[in-house]
Amino acid sequence: MTSFVSELRRRNVLRVAAAYALVAWIIIEAGSVLLPTFGASDTAFQTYVIVVLLGFFVSLIFAWIFEITPDGVKLDKDVDRAAQAENKGGLTNYAIIGLLIVALAVSVTFNVADIQPGGEPSAADIMMNRQSIAVLPFSSRSSVADNILFADGVHDDLLTKLANLGSLKVISRTSVMEYRDTTKNLRQIGEELDVDTLLEGSVQQIGANVRINVQLIDAETDEHLWARIYDRQLTTENIFTVQSEVSAEIAAALHTTLMPDEQIQAADVPTQNLRAYSLYKSGRDNLYQRRLEPLLEARTQFEQAIELDPEYAEPYVGLAESLVLLAVNHRAMTTEEAFRMAEQHIDQALLLDPELADAYATLGLLKTSEWAITRLGTENLEAEAAFEQALAINPNHAQTYMWFANLRDAEQQTDEAIGYFHRSMQLDPLGRVPYNNLPTLYAQRGENEFAIKLWLDAINIHPEWPAPYGLLAAQLLGMGRLDEAFAWDRLSRELSADSDPTGGITFSLYLQFGEIEKGKAFLAGMPESHPLAMMAPAMTALLSRDYETATAVLVEVAKEDNIMQQFIYGLTSDFALLSGDLETAREFMLIQNPILGLDSELEIDRFTVRDIVKLAYIQKQQGNSARSIELLKSALPVVQELPLLGLYGQGVREAQIYALLGQEDNAFAALGDAIQAGYRTSLVADNWWILETDPYFESMREDDRFVAIINQLDALNSVMYDRIIEAEASGDWEQLTDLAGSI
């Protein structure tokens, strides 16, 4: 070994190795900087490094075979060694070689593996590795209406093009529009939206020209990563062409690769009619609010846009969505009419633009809404296919994930629904509907306090929106916190001019507290235009326990084509049951829930179990005890899996089943457990009667234990009602609406 090392030293192999290592290190470091500058790929750089390393071994072989002498290059065997001085730098050579080889190894490792050994990455590196972006609203530096419209158009068009690219997480328009006139700094916005980069821009019209200034900013460091100015000639005829061209150039400059189909989308001009475009954009803003008056205005704006340009696809989709929401969320029109018209408009939109993600998403919403009414047919499968098509076109379509979640919820796939809602909220961190609907899924799981927290989060983000107030009130009602439910329902009604009957909570509490006159006054104060107004006579009769009159009124109302039919069917069935009219109760129950009338085996789940118990009661009263027992025994395990309290709590359903089975001791035990947990009223996700008049407990009503339970509930509820009276007298509701310390 010693002789071999000596031979290496004699032939100057070690010195050549040290020299080559130094040169190779310099070459690799220089290449790591220069090659990317000329657009070289990672593969090209790796090949470059391998060639340099191969040269190292070639140089060692050359040093072993040849020797450089004053007389030129000679073979080692021809060199006169006696004339050469002995190499004296042994230890120094070893040290230099060792250090240089370590340095070369570190350089190769970091560069080939793309690892940076500390220090701040360059702006180019940061930009290339971005995976999330928020495109903030473009500011207009001109008061000219067309300039403002153009600025919004460039912003929307760019946002759409980036959202269609699966390589980026792009925050939804509904969230970024919250920052149009914000005073928040960019770091704060980046944190709130949870993105790496922010794109901001300004548009200035100067005569017939327009200047667009765009900047990409690192959200964490506030560093400008990229900026560009676009100057274009702008006319009414080319406004959309310029808008589309600029947005496509910005997308390309952000190092996002446009596939061929995406290039077609980038060149698309939706309409040449500025007025139609303006109406569509304004309609979208109104649609986003989800409230009745803005939705009605949005419907009109979409219809006007279509009239101005019948070839403009997007307004057809907006009109379809507004119709579905008006019917489902606000009962402002019949579902039959709304769904028929919505499908026609979606078909027309897809005829005009077969690659319109919004159209497929709205089609999914329509099919989900149709299927959720009866849960029969294959509309849920059609909805799933439509949602998947929307996401294939636009992987960042937050609304699709939101509606997909609603479908999975209706299919009782709660975990998957929660996942879709969270995905929607990642893309639309300030969106309204997911913040309102996601808590209902946790309430279904019995995670009631967490559901309350999420609704409070929704209210903190959107304090002017009544929907979460109403659902929070219903959740508190189901948890037995009647005074707090009354206070939150009051807030919901103050904020809302909508026709959604959230005021039913206030009425139900007057019924629970036995406040007949206040209940009548509440009904009398209802506007004639309110959907519940037609039922006011029936609800007034209910307060007086005149169930025959209440039933007769609703039977007549149900004959008319009105927007509250689904709600009326359930009420009519309940009131008929209370009056002893079992056939009418059964008839309207099957109209509302036709799946129970099928010849196939009954599907008993959280959607049908309420009516399964009602059907069992009817069977028992009609002498079919065997069928009644069969239904009740099938329903019992389903009920026991449901949460006890909350918006989706079963309340005393388990006790009802035991009572109908004749197992009174078990019924009283279940009643006691429910009251111990917090049950105070059945008027939530239960039937439209209070415990005292519950027909299912008819066999137990004279039992001293039942009387004691009624007295116990009256005493507990009286305390809460006193707090309501006190708040009404003082006008101070803060004590009942401050939930911070209760969760």
Image: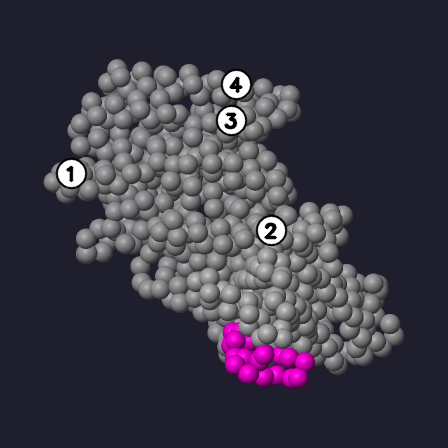
Local crowd size for mark 2, using a 10 Å CA cut-off: few (<14), some (14–19), many (≥20): some
Question: Which residue, given by chain and number where applicable, does mark 4 sit on?
Answer: 722
Amino acid residing under circle 1: Ile
Q: Is residue 490 visible?
A: yes
Membership of 738 in magenta stretch: no
Membership of 60 in magenta stretch: yes
* Lower sequence index among marks 1 and 2: 2
Which of discs 4 and 3 lies nearer the camera? The answer is 3
* Lower sequence index among marks 1 and 4: 1
Which of discs 2 and 4 lies nearer the camera? The answer is 2
Q: Is residue 360 visible?
A: no
Quarter of the view holding residue 353: bottom right
Residue 405 location (% of width, % of height): 44, 54
Amino acid residing under circle 4: Asp
SS at circle 3: helix
Question: Which residue, given by chain and number where applicable, does mark 3 sit on?
Answer: 742
Question: Which residue, given by chain and number where applicable, does mark 2 sit on?
Answer: 194
* Cα–Cα span, label 3 and label 1: 41 Å
Amino acid residing under circle 2: Asp
Q: Please give the label number shown on residue 629.
A: 1
Tell me: 593 left or right of 179.
left
Q: Which residues are magenta?
A: 56-80
Residue 251 location (% of width, % of height): 65, 71
- Residue at 54 percent of width and 53 percent of height: 426
Tell me: 572 left or right of 89.
left
- The color scheme shown is one colour
* Cα–Cα span, label 2 and label 4: 46 Å
Disc 2 and disc 4 in contact, CB within 8 angstroms: no
* Lower sequence index among marks 2 and 4: 2
Question: In the rendered view, would you say 483 is above or below 500?
Answer: above
Local crowd size for mark 4, using a 10 Å CA cut-off: few (<14), some (14–19), many (≥20): few
* Cα–Cα span, label 1 and label 2: 55 Å
